[in-house]
């Protein structure tokens, strides 16, 4: 059963606005994800590297069509985005095991990305907080995410933003928190 959602607050602050992505946003979103993958690669990380060769493991276009992608805009420019999956993907099921069943009460956060010119402005933190308090999903009480276990900065980011470390599986750290 696909749960519905309500955007409780479209404004992140005075300048950024959150909205559900539309199909016409697809190319712009893919471009942001590729830019992020290129930046990660420039830092020596292979995280999201599949995007650089056309392998989109999260089927971004399909996620947009399902209504699982949310964008952050500054005026008319895409500043950031996140995928909030209402049903666990195959990836989530492998990592979370029995917790990720079809009747799961969790939202799965993937591909939180910020356009580089908005880095170090607090936008990543604002989008992350919006994901658990600016939107509500019917029958969902938990938000889960994973990240590369050896990325110390990213792991600290999630811990500093109230996510509880659940453990590690296959080189990925698992985090969750109750939705506000």
Image (tube, helix red, strand yellow):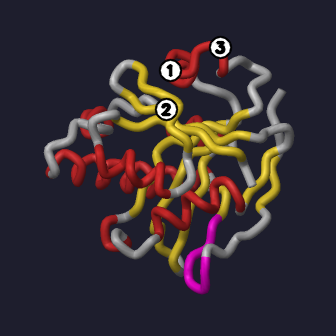
Q: Earlier in the sequence, mark 1 or mark 2?
A: 1
Please tell me which residue lies in front, 135 or 23: 135
| Image x and y of residue 168, in percent | 42, 25
Q: Quadrant of the C terminus?
A: bottom right
Residue 98 has which mark? Answer: 3
Q: Looking at the rendered structure, which numbered label has been put on residue 38?
A: none
Magenta stretch holds residue 132: no
Q: State left or right for residue 152 relative to residue 94.
A: left
Where residue 155 appears, x then y in whole percent?
A: 38, 45
Marks 3 & 2, CB-CB < 8 Å contact: no
Question: At numbered mark 2, what does the secondary structure look like: helix, strand or loop?
Answer: strand
Which residue position holds label 1? 95
Circles 1 and 2, Cβ within 8 Å, touching? The answer is yes
> Can I make out residue 83 in this image?
yes
Height in image: 77 above or below 93? Answer: below
- What is the quadrant of residue 21 in the picture? bottom right
Task: Decide which of 132, 59 is in the foreground and name it.
Answer: 132
Name which residue lies at 70% across and 17% down.
Answer: 101
* Left or right, 44 with reference to 130: left
On the image, the x and y values in percent for residue 113 come to: 42, 55
Point 55% across, 24% down: residue:
92
**Would you call the spot at circle 1 few (<14 residues within 10 Å), some (14-19), or many (20 or more)?**
some
Q: Measuring 33% from the left and 24% from the top, which residue is drawn there?
A: 171
Residue 66 position within the rendered picture, expressed as x and y whole percent measured from the top left: 68, 38
Range drawn in magenta: 13-18
Task: Name the disc covering residue 174, or none.
Answer: 2
Q: Nearer the viewer, residue 88 or 56?
A: 88
Q: Quadrant of the N terminus?
A: top right
Badge 3 marks a residue whose secondary structure is helix
Label 3 vs label 1: CA separation? 9 Å
Depth order, front residue of 77/96? 96
């Amino acid at each position: 059963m696909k749960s519905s959602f309500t955007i409780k607050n479209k404004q992140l602050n005075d300048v950024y606005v959150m909205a559900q992505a539309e199909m016409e946003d697809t190319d712009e979103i893919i471009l942001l994800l590729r830019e992020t993958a290129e930046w990660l690669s420039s830092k020596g990380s292979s995280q999201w590297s599949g995007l650089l060769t056309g392998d989109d493991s999260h089927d971004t276009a399909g996620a947009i069509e399902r209504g699982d992608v949310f964008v952050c805009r500054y005026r008319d420019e895409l500043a950031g985005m996140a995928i909030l999956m209402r049903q666990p993907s195959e990836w989530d099921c492998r990592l979370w095991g029995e917790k990720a069943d079809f009747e799961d009460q969790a939202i799965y956060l993937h591909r939180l990305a910020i356009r580089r010119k908005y880095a170090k402005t607090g936008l990543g933190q604002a989008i992350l907080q919006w994901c658990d308090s600016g939107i509500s999903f019917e029958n969902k009480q938990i938000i889960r995410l994973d990240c590369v276990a050896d990325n110390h900065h990213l792991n600290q980011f999630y811990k500093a933003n109230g996510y509880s470390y659940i453990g590690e599986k296959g080189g990925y750290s698992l985090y969750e928190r109750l939705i506000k």
